[in-house]
Image (spheres, helix red, strand yellow):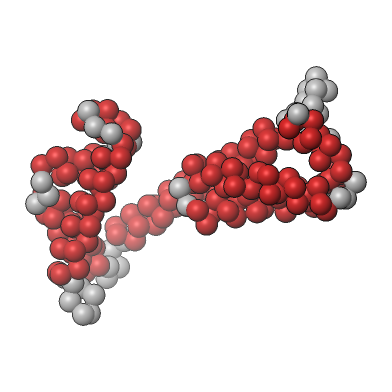
Amino acid sequence: MSEDNDQILLTRLRLGDESAFKEIYSKYFGNLVFEAFHHLRDISAAKDVVQDLFTNLWATRHLHNLSGKDKEDVKLKAYLKVSVRYSCGKIAIKKQKERGSMVQYVNESLYQNDGQDAKAQELEEIDNQIRSFINELPAKRREIVIDVYLQEVKIKEVARKNGITTGTVRNSLHRGLETIRQKFAGKINPHGTI
């Protein structure tokens, strides 16, 4: 019944019926934001993805026939979810490229020897200080922080390896990072150096 209603809404949308667009928007917006947030872990970015999807849906409304390869009707809900996942994937790829560029930039900056030795030494000092703070954490929390942040092990894998829930891993990470932040904040002088 809902799928039939969606097909009717799509037909009305193709004809420029703004009320049909509003119905689709109110029916699916929340679920699509949740879907995008699941992939991006950023509520603002998730809302932007869904907003862009609906803006595009309205702008190209006359093109949306939503027929599959075998001319069977594609379900609106599935189409919207796949569109959100696709957009999230594009964002993830872009972020990965940016992250790779940043790492390359930092590496190049650190290893250029044109008077930057002091900066490199300062960064090494900061890195050593953070590692020292990590070593002061309770054993299990230290192990979790090292696994996730230094060895880049996924949270699910850390949870499985330690026989705990992902929530417990996240809680340990949060507490560990909070401890490190507090200790680090106490080591910085008003001029921003250690």
Residue positioned 66% across, 44% down in the render: 28
Residue 125, image quadrant = bottom left
- Residue 110 x/y as whole percent: 29, 59
Question: Which one is in front, 128 or 107?
Answer: 128
148 on left or right of 22? left
Q: Is residue 85 above or below residue 183?
A: above
Q: How many marks?
A: 0
As drawn, the residue found furthest toward the top would be: 70
Q: Position of residue 82 (x, y in %)?
A: 64, 35
**Quadrant in which the C terminus appears:** bottom left
Q: Residue furthest bottom?
A: 190
- Quarter of the image with the N terminus in it: top right
| Residue 130: % across, % down | 18, 56
Answer left or right for 129 relative to 83.
left
| Residue at screen point 30% across, 40% down | 167
Give the image location of residue 38, x and y in percent.
49, 42
Residue found farthest to the front: 1
Q: Is residue 56 above or below residue 161?
A: below
Q: Is residue 61 left or right of residue 113?
A: right
Answer with left or right where residue 147 lies relative to residue 62.
left
Is residue 86 among the parts visible in the rendering? Answer: no
In this orientation, which residue lies closer to the viewer: 20 or 148? 20
Query: Residue visible at 79% across and 35% down?
Result: 5
Asked which quadrant contains residue 66, the reply is top right
Q: Residue at x 50, y 53 (%)?
A: 43
Q: Is residue 111 visible?
A: yes
